[in-house]
Image (cartoon, rainbow, N blue to C red):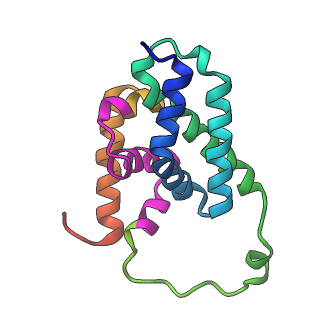
Amino acid sequence: MEQTVRQQLSDYIVAHQEEFYRLAYSYVKNRDAALDVVQESIVKALAKSDTLRRPEYLKTWFYRILLNESMNHHRRAKRLVPLEDTLLETPAPARERLDLYDAIERLDWKEQTVVRLRFFEDMKLEEIARVTNTNLNTVKSRLYKSLRRLRELTEEEC
């Protein structure tokens, strides 16, 4: 018996919830916020499951929802300035070498997304193109540009 899209989606969510949390956390940098992002993504996906025309794209369809929710949260959070930030008057001492995760944070949003989906979520470039609704050549270009920048930022040779 063939599963409905909603059943496939539910099974997929249960099987990959840790991966969704990890990706959301990489954007929002807060445990509770990441859980909220994942929860909102799941609610939206379940509510819109009837709009998925091709079940073979379930993974990329859900990741697009997750990325959009992460970006929405990031935009809302950017408008808020934490009290600790307003109290700090002296800048932190500059470090000579950046940690890889810090370097990824310095990339622009589109570059971060390509790097995270490719290396943290192990997605193929074609899948990333579908998730981000971007041309495959653009994804390739962003990935290679991002890797060059990361190499420069971390001062390491790959």
- Magenta includes 111? yes
Query: Taking 39 as reference, is 6 above or below it?
Result: above
Occupied quadrant, residue 47:
top right
Observer able to see residue 148: yes
Q: Please, which residue is most extreme toward the front here?
A: 1
Indicate the position of residue 15 as horizontal and vertical percent values.
Answer: 45, 42
Between 136 and 13, which is closer to the camera in this rendering? 13
Q: Quadrant of the C terminus?
A: bottom left
Indicate the position of residue 21 as horizontal and vertical percent values.
Answer: 54, 52
Q: Residue at x 30, y 35 (%)?
A: 125
Between 149 and 79, which is closer to the camera in this rendering? 79
Occupied quadrant, residue 39:
top right
Between 11 and 26, which is closer to the camera in this rendering? 11
Q: Residue at x 40, y 75 (%)?
A: 98
Marks counted in the figure total: 0
Query: Taking 147 as reference, is 118 above or below it?
Result: above
Occupied quadrant, residue 80:
bottom right
Q: Which residues are magenta?
A: 101-127
Query: Taking 75 as reference, is 9 above or below it?
Result: above
Observer able to see residue 63: no
Question: Would residue 147 appear left or right of 74 to someone viewing this image?
Answer: left
Q: Quadrant of the N terminus?
A: top left
Question: Would residue 157 appear left or right of 71 to someone viewing this image?
Answer: left
Indicate the position of residue 121 as horizontal and vertical percent values.
Answer: 38, 47
Q: Residue at x 47, y 32 (%)?
A: 132
Indicate the position of residue 40 as horizontal and vertical percent values.
Answer: 68, 41
- Magenta includes 112? yes
Question: Would residue 10 appear left or right of 131 to someone viewing this image?
Answer: right
Q: Main secondary structure of the magenta part?
A: helix
